[in-house]
Image (tube, helix red, strand yellow):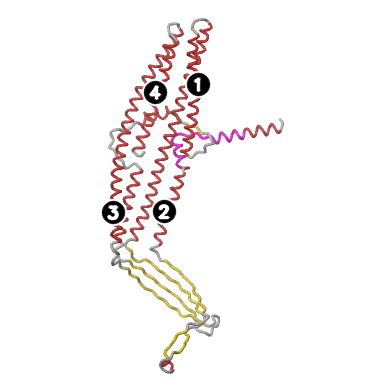
């Protein structure tokens, strides 16, 4: 074999293999998991968690010993001059003597430690920091909930389009067969040209419709890719069909009489943690009225010489201090009281938001249950209508082939069948959406 041809074939096989590997096949759960893992919001939430952990460590450090050190060197080009009354040195009264104290060089090394012994608001603030971390987790749960909702709806948008395409392909195949048989009847003089033209028009319309559906599928897949944060330039396939998900709904079912519980919703967790933070904020502000006690220690040694390296001159002189500093709030012109009032307002707002969320979620669950129940009934009704329309269409075809029916009758039966099939597919779609909305409403 020619080496160039062999290399070309090898390259084509490699490219094909790469394309096959790049093409992913997703169930609805796998699509949601992929989106959660690769979502920008997930990455941002992880960064916020890392930041929250660092903030906790930073705040905790403010209550632990703080140690600092320093070295200070001074060289006096001109020593400071002081004036002393002359009589101190035996000079006439009313005169002053100019004297200089100190040495040319001063070198001081020091170390200082401060530590918080008691602060009423410190431990409350530390607890608030930990709860703030819980808030980030709750917000991450809410973000995942939104991702699941968006990806699920986008996934369902693709499979309903694929279901409609499957119906069209089946109908095109059946109609093409009928059209070919009618053309034979025309050649033998059993039907009119008008009969063939009607069937041909229906056939052309179905082909136009399937082209539109193909474009809709591509558009829906792009929306799904975007929601999943999946590369838009790579192909994607779905492993579950509308019928698969509808069958799963029938198997799982739903308890429509269960007591409504809104605690499963991630938004509820977020607002509960926000409520705790507001309560701790009030507590921390109130504890600010308590005294705070700080311990400190300072160790330093000073070297003063005209010549730093002259050992005959005076050496180091240490100074060591330990002590306590008590700070007692006495009067702040009602500043802290105003802050407490503002914090109480924030807490009251949280209570109201919690009540409104409870009402809104309860309404959402109630409406989702009604939609689910209606969707079940609609599936049953449209299934019967589809079966009846299919029976009528088959009868119309038989009558037409036997010469006792018209092509118009076949065309009308055909249109009714397409409408019934579309209605049934939409009913299945509405059922899956209703079950999904119900699961999301209760926080599943």
- Residue 122: x and y in percent read 34, 61
Of labels 1 and 4, earlier in sequence is 1
Residue at mark 2? 52
In the foreground, 116 or 221: 221
Q: Residue furthest top?
A: 189
Magenta: main secondary structure: helix
Depth check, mark 2 against mark 1: the one in front is: 1
The tally of labels here is: 4
Q: Is residue 291 magenta?
A: no
- Residue 356: x and y in percent read 29, 43
Dividing the image into 4 quarters, which one contains the N terminus? top right
Q: Residues within 10 Å of mark 3 (few under 14, many from 20)?
A: some
Residue at mark 1? 207
**Mark sitting on residue 423:** 4
Depth check, mark 4 against mark 3: the one in front is: 3
Of labels 3 and 2, earlier in sequence is 2
- Residue 331: x and y in percent read 28, 66
Of labels 4 and 3, earlier in sequence is 3
Residue at mark 3? 344
**CA gap, disc 3 and disc 2:** 25 Å
Of labels 4 and 2, earlier in sequence is 2
Above or below: residue 92 compared with residue 208: below
Depth check, mark 1 against mark 4: the one in front is: 1
Determine the residue positioned at 30% across, 68% down. Answer: 328
């Amino acid at each position: 074999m020619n080496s160039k041809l062999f290399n070309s074939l090898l390259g084509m096989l490699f490219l094909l293999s790469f394309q096959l590997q790049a093409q992913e096949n997703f169930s609805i759960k796998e699509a949601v998991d992929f989106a959660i893992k690769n979502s920008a919001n997930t990455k941002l939430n992880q960064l916020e968690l890392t930041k929250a952990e660092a903030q906790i460590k930073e705040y905790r450090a403010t209550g632990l010993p703080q140690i600092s050190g320093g070295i200070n060197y001074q060289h006096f080009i001109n020593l400071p001059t002081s004036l002393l009354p002359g009589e101190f040195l035996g000079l006439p009264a009313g005169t002053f003597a100019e004297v200089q104290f100190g040495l040319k060089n001063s070198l001081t090394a020091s170390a200082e430690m401060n530590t918080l012994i008691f602060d009423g608001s410190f431990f409350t603030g530390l607890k608030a920091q930990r709860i703030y971390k819980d808030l980030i987790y709750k917000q991450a749960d809410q973000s995942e909930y939104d991702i699941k909702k968006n990806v699920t709806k986008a996934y369902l948008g693709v499979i309903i389009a694929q279901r409609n395409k499957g119906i069209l392909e089946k109908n095109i195949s059946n109609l093409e067969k009928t059209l070919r048989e009618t053309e034979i009847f025309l050649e033998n003089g059993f039907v009119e040209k008008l009969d063939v033209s009607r069937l041909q028009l229906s056939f052309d319309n179905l082909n136009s419709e399937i082209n539109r559906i193909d474009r809709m599928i591509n558009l829906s897949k792009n929306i799904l890719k975007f929601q999943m944060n999946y590369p838009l330039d790579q192909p994607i396939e779905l492993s579950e069909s509308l019928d698969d998900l509808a069958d799963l709904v029938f198997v799982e079912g739903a308890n429509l009489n269960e007591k409504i519980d809104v605690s499963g919703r991630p938004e509820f967790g977020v607002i509960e943690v926000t409520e705790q933070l507001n309560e701790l904020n009030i507590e921390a502000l109130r504890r600010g009225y308590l005294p705070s006690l700080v311990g400190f220690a300072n160790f330093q040694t000073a070297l003063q010489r005209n010549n730093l390296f002259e050992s005959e001159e005076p050496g180091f002189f240490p100074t060591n201090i330990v002590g306590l500093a008590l700070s007692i709030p006495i009067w702040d012109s009602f500043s802290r009281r105003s802050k407490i009032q503002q914090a109480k307002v924030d807490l009251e707002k949280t209570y109201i938001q919690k009540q409104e969320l409870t009402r809104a979620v309860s309404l959402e669950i109630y409406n989702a249950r009604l939609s689910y129940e209606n969707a079940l009934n609609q599936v049953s009704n449209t299934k019967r209508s589809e079966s009846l329309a299919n029976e009528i269409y088959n009868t119309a075809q038989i009558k037409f082939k036997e010469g006792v029916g018209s092509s118009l009758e076949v065309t009308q039966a055909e249109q009714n069948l397409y409408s019934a099939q579309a209605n049934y597919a939409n009913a299945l779609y509405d059922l899956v959406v209703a079950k999904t909305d119900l699961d999301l409403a209760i926080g599943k």
